[in-house]
Image: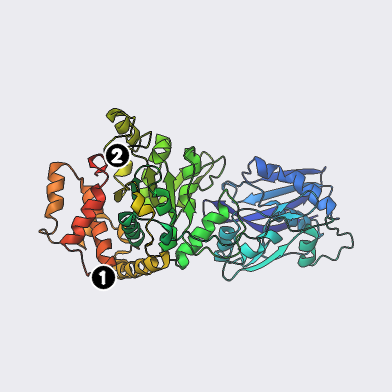
Amino acid sequence: MGFARTYAVALLGLNGHMVEVEADIGQTLPAFVLLGLPDSALMESKERIRAAAKNSGVPLASRKITASLTPATLPKGGTVFDLAILMAALQAAGDVPGTGGAVFLAELGLDGGLRPVPGVFPAVAAAVRSGHRRVVVARENLEEARLVPDAEVSGFRSVADVLEWAGSTSPRLSRPPGQAPRTEDPPEPRRRPDLADVVGQAEGRWALEIAAAGSHHLSMIGPPGSGKTMLAERLPGILPPLDAAASHEVTAVHSLGARRTRLTRLMTEAPWEAPHHTASTASMVGGGSGVPLPGAASRAHRGVLFLDEAPEFRRGVLDALRQPLESGEITIDRSRASARYPARFQLVLASNPCACGLSTGLGDRCTCSPRERRSYLGRLSGPLMDRVDLHLSVPRLSYAEVTATTRGEPSDVVASRVRAAREAARERLQPLGVRANADLTGAQLRDRLRLPSALLSPLHRLIERGDLTVRGSDRVQRIAWTIADLEGAASPASEHLEAAIALRISSGPRLIA
């Protein structure tokens, strides 16, 4: 009886930490001791490992088995350590040859099968960064794990397959009967809705193009059926493809996300998240027991987070978005661990003008009192709306607009202009270390991209009257830079600034920030 070591990866957020799984076989009565700050799911692995080993034809030694996961101070949870613990125990007993520095990431079934685990993409990436290129995963995780450059990944369906790969020649090896893949075929790529389907709403289309070109947040207020949701759904289709760094970040988040999908390629399109208005704070920003999982805000990283019927969301859920809107990341602290996730998304809010939704500005059919209307939109707090760049009023469509035979430009035409504007902004902003106009800080606008005082005089008057805050003034300037980029101008002119002011305050004085 002896000692052996294998390797696994513990994830805290998207940060992977190498874990040494040590096993020792003692000359005492049979027992299985697991050390290293395991959670309840990991403590249960002892019984899964015993059953999986027995049903694979290589039962664990009838001695005291001590398995230690180091560093011991690092919180560890879930089922991802099952296979690493089993391989360490079998090597310590002399049933399997050594596997060198191989990393094992798989859950065990009682029948000896290997089951997929979440977070394989960031876990394999962490292993490669640490110098451990050989990785063993469940067969269902193989395609996802192979997305990591320089990784030497092997995928298996059973413990017996892993033991044969490791060099075992035992004639007792057995596999689960009737074994088959446990995941469905990857879903077909979803067709993005096209802007050509939107009837009328020329100003809404223009605002959507500006939002895409500058990565600006957008709020739309209008009666039901005016096209707010249709416009929002078409925003991802005109956003540029993700670059390499963003693609790896987004893929890592979705690998770890609660809604598990089979990842067979890097995600290159901007993600889209549209949670229901009954969503909790934890589902929006992330949470859960043990190590917190990413929420909708992080799954929308480098994409769009759409909140339809925004005033119907709970106030605490909406205000929880204020911090990530500024910082672009979410840090979730729990008693056992702290996890940090990226959350640089574009927020799109769609709201009715009142609770009944019939107000058109004239109030001819609306049954809400002025106080009820103010109270309804007042659910969107001032500090939240202060962080939204574009405030758009979406009018009800007329019969002539609905029946018009002419249609607007398709998404691919608009997307080409957005890409050109993004490229112009990238060349200008690269020395500042930011990616889009919406990411500019107030200090950068005033020190590095300062506009002439004469051009900014309308903003100064709005600030003096109390109609615009300094933060709001900065956001107007960002919008002006984006409009200038779309028109191919070297810097904003007075007409660009006037258009930016109109887009900032078009939803009425209550929303001016």
Quadrant containing the N terminus in the rendered view? bottom right
Residue assigned mark 2? 382
- Between circles 2 and 1, the one closer to the viewer is 1
* Element carrying mark 1: loop
> In terms of sequence position, does the residue under pointer 2 or pointer 1 come before the other?
2
Mark 2 residue type: Gly
In-image side of 320 versus 36 (left or right) = left
Is any atom of residue 439 visible in this view? no
> On the image, which quarter does residue 47 sit in?
top right
Mark 1 residue type: Gly
Give the camera-side residue of 227 and 432: 227
> On the image, which quarter does residue 493 sit in?
bottom left
Residue assigned mark 1? 488
In-image side of 302 versus 467 (left or right) = right
Distance between the Cα atoms at labels 2 and 1? Answer: 34 Å
| Extreme residue in the right direction | 171
In-image side of 10 versus 384 (left or right) = right
Give the camera-side residue of 240 and 473: 240
| Extreme residue in the left direction | 454
**Residue 376 pos. (x, y %):** 35, 33
In-image side of 508 versus 231 (left or right) = left
Quadrant containing the C terminus in the rendered view? top left
Is any atom of residue 178 visible in this view? yes
Residue at figure coordinates x 34%, y 62% from the top left: 213
* Element carrying mark 2: helix
**Residue 333 pos. (x, y %):** 47, 42
**Residue 56 pos. (x, y %):** 83, 55
